[in-house]
Amino acid sequence: MFLLKQKFLLPLTILMSLLATFVVYTYLQKQRDQKPTDENAPQPVIVAAQDLAVGVKFEPIHLKEVAWPKNLLPAGTFSDTSRLLGRITRMTMVAGEPVLESKLAPVGSSSGFSSLIPPGMRAMTVSVNVVSGVSGFILPDAHVDVLVTVTSSNNKEESKTKIILEDVLVLAVDQTFEREDDDPVKVQSVTLLVDPTQAEKLALASSEGKLQLVLRNSVDRDSQGTRGVQLRELISNAGSSSRDDARPRVAAPAPPPQEKPAAHTVEVIRSNKREQITFTQPEKSAENNTP
């Protein structure tokens, strides 16, 4: 009986191994032939074939088609190269990056700097120096507030400084509209993105007063709505804070004069001489005054 078991043990093991191999092979074959689900099916996506700068007009050499998982597709992608030919880049792109509608200028825009201006907006350049340009730290894509200081010709104290524009996007610094780093640069002009109403305010302010730019935090979008400050208010506030220091000090009143101790005169007769001796009562000490 033992020999019979040993006789059939090896063939049985080989048969079980072949059966397991067949099952695994069949499963893998079905997985390979099975069509992917709609959720994970790769989709054709147009990506940048090379690094692209701002203001580039798309040509066939700039684009290529790749397969991209459908569930990982960002919004605004393109699947047809012909829809992108002639479009202008509004932001820099790196090779292999999907081309998105948000990174392109509107349809029909010309190449160059004008493609950065959205419909309904205007680009306006103002002169700045190292001080008004925040020591060169105002760079493209930064957000600033614009202050104007107007000096009164009749009364100096009527001069006023007021924020006229808030949260304004900087399109370009001098003739540069691409920011490569955050290092400060010396500039002579800044181009701001404004609407027509803001452009009118900015033109009047630049001709009638002195402009100053205030750099904002990149995520700060709140509007403060200040009322401005006049020179008269500035001087009066500064004077009121130091008025107490400038006021003359009043001397402390002098202590009342102390009463002189009472004196007693005594006439002394010695032999045939007569003398008058004056005795003064001694002051009471502080110890005697204490109970």
Image: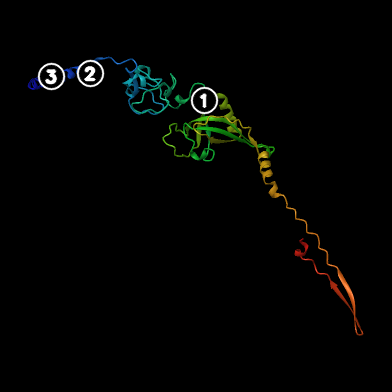
Q: Residue at x 58, y 27 (%)?
A: 200
Q: Secondary structure at mark 3?
A: helix
Q: Earlier in the sequence, mark 3 or mark 2?
A: 3
Give how far apart the Cα atoms at labels 1 and 2 are: 61 Å
Task: Report the front residue among 127 and 161.
Answer: 161
The foreground one among 179 and 270 is 270
Mark 1–mark 3 distance (CA, rounded to whole Å):
85 Å
Percent coordinates x, y for residue 280 in the rendering: 84, 71
Q: Amino acid at mark 3?
A: Leu
Which is nearer the eye, 271 or 120? 271
Judged from the image, the secondary structure of the residue bearing numbered disc 2 is: helix
> Which residue is label 2 attached to?
28
Give the number of the mark in front: 1 or 3: 3
**Category of crowding for the residue at label 3, using alpha-carbon neighbours closer than 10 angstroms: few (below 14), some (14–19), many (at least 20):** few
Label of residue 12 in the image: 3
Mark 1 Cα-neighbour bin, 10 Å: few <14, some 14–19, many ≥20: some
Above or below: residue 27 compared with residue 189: above
Residue 5 location in percent, x, y? 10, 21
Q: Quadrant of the C terminus?
A: bottom right
Local packing at callout 2 (Cα closer than 10 Å; few below 14, some 14-19, many 20+) is few
Q: Quadrant of residue 225?
A: top right
